[in-house]
């Protein structure tokens, strides 16, 4: 009898639990319907915005990076959990990407082939509805955007551990393209091979930057393996898939694309915070988003105190400088140009005043772009 008495509450509890689960699922279904209806409504309003702008010719005419940055910042400001900011930003980025593609998908050039970190950065910034154009080199990304074959381009400019990608800076010495956005991508390097066995590996393919980011791990674990630099990590994965004694250092996405296995489950980069910053290239300036960065190229006159004269106007007008990098100007021997990143937009009064003062001391000032600071 005692057993029968205890079984009734258990049965009732099970029935209540099943009822609660059914109610929760029904509520989720209702919310999903509301979300879908609201997304459809948003897409309709996006079409109305397009019509309000007039008879424009291409998707690039509809894209406004400053507006997207403002929308994503509002997403973060409204978020009180339980989902992380990064997850919600990704969801809204994809919604905006799909809405924009109603007109025509944006064509985005990036350092290919498929599976590179540049492709990941491109997808992070433009979403899955953009049409990616994998290109053979950073120089070719600049060329395709300049020619109008790509609406925008995405190129790496610096890594948190290894510093500047010099070829990108050098391209700005002659290119008329503008920087209209930036992307920060956490980079996780994996050792990939066809067999997945570390004892098989005799040679490793990778981009020189990736070798630099993993040199301590390689020295400790594969000191005798031949290191062969190639143009991209995806190219490394493509080559490694052809032999059991070869491996590639690349991102997880490249392993999926080229059918390679992780030799070591954990990432092998020497720094856990390994991050690469990418620039979005376009053909025009955009208005302020409210939280922007301006990049300028300054050629200095050969005179005492020249660098001080370049930097002091920004200090006097309260403009913060986050980065300065020198490169040969390519105009004359021992002449240098300085790439400077500044806090603020080119239309901000302090920025205007600082640049106007700088003109008295600089041989040339070239504003490379004013663009939204990366959102996550």
Image (cartoon, grey):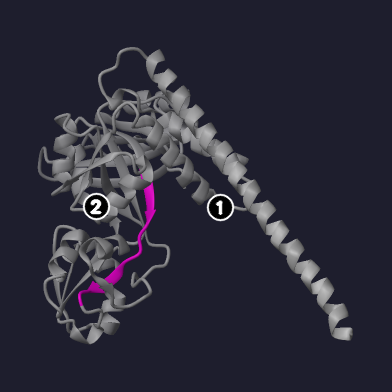
Quadrant in which residue 305 is drawn: top left
Q: Position of residue 137 (x, y in %)?
A: 14, 48
User: In the image shown, does 18 or 131 lie closer to the viewer?
Assistant: 18
Which residue in the structure is indicated by mark 2?
Answer: 165
Say which of marks 2 and 1 sits in front.
Answer: 1
Asked if the magenta segment contains residue 36, the reply would be: no
Q: Position of residue 187 (x, y in %)?
A: 35, 60
Q: Position of residue 9 (x, y in %)?
A: 83, 72
Q: Which portion, as a residue range, is magenta?
A: 182-194
Q: Position of residue 127 (x, y in %)?
A: 36, 42
User: In the image shown, does 295 or 76 lie closer to the viewer?
Assistant: 76
Q: At 64% across and 48% down in the image, what residue appears?
A: 26
Q: Secondary structure at mark 1?
A: loop
Q: At 36% across and 27% down in the image, what residue appears?
A: 355
Which residue in the structure is indicated by mark 1?
Answer: 84
- Cβ–Cβ under 8 Å for marks 2 and 1: no
């Amino acid at each position: 009898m005692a057993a029968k008495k205890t079984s009734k509450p258990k049965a009732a509890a099970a029935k209540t639990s099943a009822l609660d689960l059914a109610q929760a699922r029904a509520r989720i279904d209702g919310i999903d319907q509301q979300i879908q209806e609201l997304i459809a409504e948003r897409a309709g309003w996006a079409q109305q915005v397009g019509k309000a702008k007039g008879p424009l010719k291409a998707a690039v005419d509809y894209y406004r990076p400053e507006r997207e940055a403002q929308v994503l910042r509002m997403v973060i400001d409204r978020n009180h959990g339980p989902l992380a900011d990064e997850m919600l930003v990704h969801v809204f980025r994809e919604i905006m990407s799909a809405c924009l593609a109603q007109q025509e998908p944006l064509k985005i050039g990036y350092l290919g082939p498929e599976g590179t970190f540049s492709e990941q950065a491109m997808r992070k910034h433009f979403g899955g509805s953009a049409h990616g154009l994998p290109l053979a080199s950073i120089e070719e990304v600049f060329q395709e955007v300049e020619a109008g074959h790509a609406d925008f381009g995405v190129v790496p400019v610096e890594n948190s551990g290894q510093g500047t990608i010099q070829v990108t800076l050098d391209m700005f010495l002659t290119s008329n393209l503008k920087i209209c956005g930036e992307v920060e991508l956490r980079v996780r390097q994996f050792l990939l091979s066809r067999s997945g066995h570390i004892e098989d590996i005799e040679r490793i393919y990778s981009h020189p930057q990736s070798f630099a980011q993993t040199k301590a791990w390689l020295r400790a674990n594969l000191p005798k393996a031949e290191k062969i630099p190639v143009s991209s990590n995806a190219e490394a994965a493509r080559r490694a898939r052809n032999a059991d004694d070869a491996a590639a250092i690349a991102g997880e996405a490249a392993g999926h694309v080229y059918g390679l296995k992780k030799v070591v489950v954990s990432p092998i980069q020497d720094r856990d915070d390994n991050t690469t910053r990418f620039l979005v290239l376009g053909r025009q300036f955009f208005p302020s988003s409210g939280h922007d960065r301006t990049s300028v190229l300054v050629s200095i006159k050969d005179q005492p105190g020249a660098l001080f004269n370049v930097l002091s106007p920004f200090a006097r007008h309260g403009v913060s400088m986050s980065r300065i990098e020198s490169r040969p100007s390519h105009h004359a021997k021992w002449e240098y140009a300085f790439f400077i990143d500044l806090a603020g937009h080119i239309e901000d009064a302090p920025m205007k005043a600082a640049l106007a003062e700088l003109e008295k001391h600089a041989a040339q000032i070239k504003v490379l772009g004013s663009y939204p600071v990366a959102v996550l």
